Image: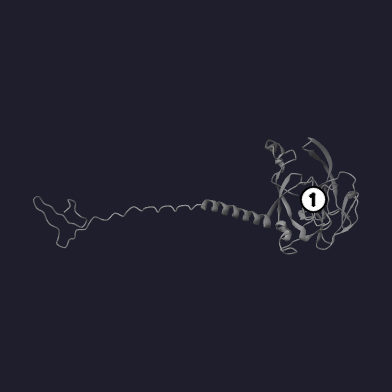
Amino acid sequence: MSDNPAPDEIIDEAPGDTIDAAPDAVEHPPAAVAPEPVAAPAPKEKPGDSWLETVKTIVYALLIALVIRTFLFQPFNIPTGSMIATLLVGDYLFVEKFAYGYSRNSFPYSLAPFHGRVFGSAPTPGDVIVFKMPNPASEHYMEDYIKRCIGLPGDRIQVLDGVLYINGKAVPKVRVADFIEHDAIMGTTMPVPQFRETLPNGRSYLVLDRGTTDFDNTIVFVVPPGHYFMMGDNRDNSDDSRGNVGYVPAENLVGRAELRFFSIDESAIWYEPWTWPGAIRFSRMFTLID
């Protein structure tokens, strides 16, 4: 018997005497100690698993980006000066795709197999809108254009002596401080007369007037049903509904320009990174588009 009593033993020792355990007492073995859990060996990574996970991650990211670009917001950059001073060459902006609903032109390469608009709503005069060039005779047919919406279906639009008329009434045009046009490559500046126009709905924005041009006097344009009349803010240097663009069908609308998120001038050279910091227009970044 062990020198140490088992838990259920009763011991009563007197000098010289030993009292045995009661007949019905049962000696119990020491309590068993649970074995330490052994960690299961990590499954061996099969050849190609890491590569497959990387591919999955890239595919998921591309799908998410495609959904955002198609249904929510699409980035664009401005390559020409037709919307100066509102938008400058080198501005990057987000266009809200759901502003006017969706058409086949909301989708990449206009591949969606339907016509008309889904969840469509009409633009508000004064909105800055990206649309597909509607004139099939133009070399830029179905390219992305950006202009300001001036006329809705049924409106009569005319320009006389550089003044915009909507439905026979002159749109107020007030002279403000000149716009200072920078030539980033030549390092020169030039003041351009600038005016504030206010549409009948109260929407106000800036336009440039460089002098007398063919666009300063036009016929009366009557906007047909389901179409819109677009004009650039750089009034004397814009191909818009007064010229080759013509009336823009509702189906050609891509979305409403909302936010500039980046801007860089023409002095930046892509293969010379040291030119980039000085070319960034920090004051235009993350600003709303009027």
Q: Is residue 35 left or right of residue 197?
A: left
Residue 253 vs residue 143, the one in the foreground = 143
Q: What residue appears at the point 81 percent right and 60 percent down from the top-left corner?
A: 227
Q: Is residue 277 left or right of residue 58?
A: right
Residue bearing the label numbered 1? 204
Badge 1 crowding class, 10 Å Cα cut-off, few under 14, some 14 to 19, many 20 or more, is some
Percent of width and height locating residue 105: 73, 58
Q: How is the image coloured?
A: one colour
Q: What residue appears at the point 80 percent right and 40 percent down from the top-left corner?
A: 181
Q: Is residue 250 above or below residue 214?
A: below
Residue 186 vs residue 125, the one in the foreground = 186
Q: Is residue 52 above or below residue 186?
A: below
* Residue 202 visible here: no
Q: Secondary structure at mark 1?
A: strand
* Residue 59 visible here: yes
Percent of width and height locating residue 245: 83, 54
Percent of width and height locating residue 133: 79, 55
The furthest residue to the front: 47
Q: How many marks?
A: 1
Q: Is residue 249 left or right of residue 271?
A: right
Q: What residue appears at the point 68 percent right and 37 percent down from the top-left corner?
A: 273
Q: What residue appears at the point 52 percent right and 51 percent down from the top-left corner?
A: 50
Give the quarter of the figure containing the N terminus: bottom left
Percent of width and height locating residue 269: 72, 39
Q: Amino acid at mark 1?
A: Ser
Residue 238 vs residue 178, the one in the foreground = 238
